[in-house]
Image (cartoon, rainbow, N blue to C red):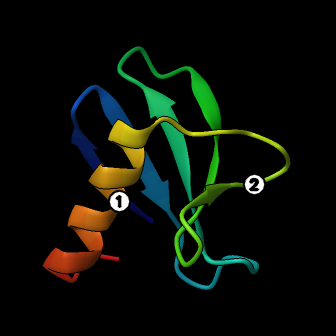
Amino acid sequence: MARVRRYGYILEWYLGDHVPRHVHVFDRKGTFLGRLDVNRLTGVEGWTPDRRLVRFVEELRCEGRL
């Protein structure tokens, strides 16, 4: 499992987790918000992430962390 905290979000992901490739998103208090598809940058199961979170995931992809 990996975890990173930035911009008021906590992201967790698990190696070998089921598809689609995704991260689990929590707020700064640890409340689960939803899952974000890393490839399509969209919410999973009808959840809609805000643009700030999408930019955060894009940054992690550019850094090679995702």
Residue 45 shown left or right of residue 42 in the figure: right
Which of 26/62 is in front?
A: 62
Q: Is residue 27 above or below residue 1?
A: above
Residue occupying the far right of the picture:
45
Which of 38/1 is in front?
A: 38
Residue 16 shown left or right of residue 55 in the figure: right
Residue 51: give x, y in percent of width and height.
Answer: 41, 41
- In the rendered image, the quadrant that contains the C terminus is bottom left
Residue 4 shown left or right of residue 57 in the figure: left
Q: CA distance from mark 1 to mark 2?
A: 14 Å
Which quadrant of the figure has residue 32?
A: top right
Circle 2 SS class: loop
Q: Which residue is mark 1?
A: 57
Residue occupying the far left of the picture:
63
Kind of residue sitting beneath label 2: Val
Residue 6: give x, y in percent of width and height.
Answer: 21, 39
Neighbor class of circle 2 (other Cα within 10 Å; few <14, some 14-19, many 20+) is some
Which of 63/48 is in front?
A: 48
Q: Residue at x 54, y 70 (%)?
A: 14
Mark 1 or mark 2, which has the lower sequence index? 2
- In the rendered image, the quadrant that contains the N terminus is bottom left
Q: Is residue 52 above or below residue 54?
A: above
Residue 26: give x, y in percent of width and height.
Answer: 49, 32
Q: Which residue is mark 2?
A: 44
Residue 10: give x, y in percent of width and height.
Answer: 37, 38
Q: Is residue 28 above or below residue 38?
A: above
Circle 1 SS class: helix
Kind of residue sitting beneath label 1: Val
